Amino acid sequence: MSRTALLKRVGSAILRPIPRTTCLSRGNGRPFHVSQNWQTDGVYHELTAMRVRTPWIEAFRKQQEEGIVEAQSTPPATAKKHQTSPKKMSDSYHRIILPLAQDHWLSDNYLNATGHVRLGTLFMDLDALSGIIAYKHTGDHVMTVTAGLDRIVIKNQLTKICDLELSGEVTFATGRSSMEISCQVAKAPEQGAHRTPDDVLLTCTFTMVSLDPNTKKPVAIAPLQIDTAEEQNIYDQGERNYQAKKAMAKVNLRKTTPNDEESDLIHELWLRQLEYHDSSSSTTKPSNVIYMENTRLHSAQIMQPQYRNRHNFMIFGGYLLKQTFELAFSCAASFSHTRPTFISLDPSTFQNPVPVGSVLYLTATVAYTDEPGSSTNDNAAGTNDEETTRVQIRVDSRVRNIEHGETKPTGQFNYTFLVKKDIKVMPRTYSEFMIWVDARRRARQVDASVESVEASRGKEGDQSITE
């Protein structure tokens, strides 16, 4: 065969299209397909398949054809009559297993460069899970969105890679438009074994709101039917959480002024920083005190359709949780020059949806610092004898369209970390003082979580591998 003929044969073989069903294999036996499995980074494929039901190109074409700004491909054109008969908690229960110990390729999406489990990816999964649970309770005839994340609390430290069980159910619903969904992440029990409280890694509660898919107005959903004393206790806790949120809303700093104690603290801090700038004073700013304005970190990114929600044209809340958490972690690390330990996410809100194709701006700020479990110390600069400091990071998010002609706030997220360092933050402007006061109030509510983390550290001899 001539050289020219040989090159033609080789070239035609290279250019020949590979059938979609062809499966190639690497040397280690891991198969891969020309058409990759349908999933998004950091979200287990079982959850993704239930969250996103229409390929983006089909949803986009339908939007173009119909000329609708927000085409809804899943709900019917006319909303059906809503089913509001009571439902059991068990009706919405959902459980999945993340086989991280069994599937090392899957763990690629869940581990960082130091081998720690990325909590941000678990937060994405939990939000996707809460969506599945919500629709099991409401049905597909309504549109359900995440209104807020009431709490994420670390219960026990994870010290080795293992299979994880994600589970949850609706735990509070009165028949109005909102519901509380409680979820947890735990070590997956062995075959035939039962999960123990020490196996629980973290717990969280989401607030979901159901809307009419056409009018986007709140609609009534089924209330919960309580059958056992245990369910009654869970429901009562949901009621207390609901009342606590209403009480917090009444004392919001946008509605009320700081109380007398907070006003005195603000004045004290203001006087202290005046001394730092007074050349005639012997008081100098300690090296472990950082001004709040110098702690901020920013990010900006275009929202791509791979992270859309069930309704195709908005970003799903779990992706925002992941992005805000990782920016908050980076902010705490930059502030303390140490590796932070996550304690909790305190009540956080989703104010406005984030459209696909928009630009998301995030700003992380060190809002407050004090010792773990302290209820008296308020940034007494240079007086902390402890080796660890509690650091609260506030992440504010806002969205702009690509032309940057319109800006909307989309949420506020409040993360708390422990750092192995004596370090303090100090506000200087009135806006910063309000951020500090708001964070101080939240810190008073996180004390129990800190004690839980410290207790779990005492039980585990190994270092935590979550981050």
Image (tube, rainbow, N blue to C red):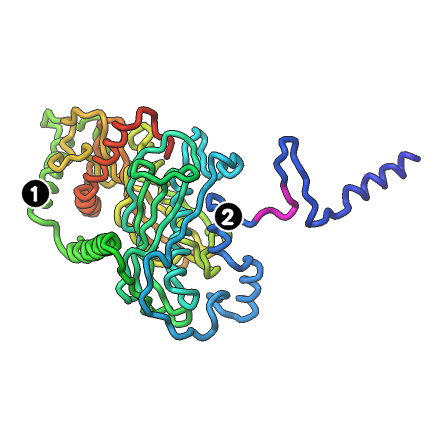
Residue ID for mark 2: 45
Q: Main secondary structure of the magenta part?
A: loop
Task: Verify whether residue 33 appears in magenta.
Answer: yes
The magenta segment is 32-37
Residue 93 x, y percent position in the rendering: 37, 54
Above or below, comparing residue 115 to residue 394 in the picture: above
Compute the Cα span from label 2 to label 1.
Answer: 53 Å
Question: Residue, x 39% and y 42% (percent of image)?
Answer: 120
Residue 6 x, y percent position in the rendering: 87, 37
> As drawn, is 238 to the left or to the right of 268?
right
Q: Nearer the viewer, residue 5 or 149?
A: 149
Q: Which kind of residue does numbered mark 2 sit on?
A: His
Residue 212 x, y percent position in the rendering: 38, 69
Above or below, comparing residue 106 to residue 167 in the picture: above
Indicate the quadrant where residue 81 lies.
bottom left
Looking at the image, can residue 191 be seen? yes
Residue 382 x, y percent position in the rendering: 16, 26
SS for dot 2? helix
- Neighbor class of circle 2 (other Cα within 10 Å; few <14, some 14-19, many 20+) is some
Residue ID for mark 1: 264
Q: Nearer the viewer, mark 2 or mark 1?
A: 2
Indicate the quadrant where residue 145 lies.
bottom left
Question: Residue, x 16% and y 58% (percent of image)?
Answer: 250
> As drawn, is 280 to the left or to the right of 11?
left
The furthest residue to the front: 192
Quadrant for the N terminus in the image = top right
Q: Which kind of residue does numbered mark 1 sit on?
A: Asp
Quadrant for the C terminus in the image = top left
Above or below, comparing residue 32 to residue 387 in the picture: below
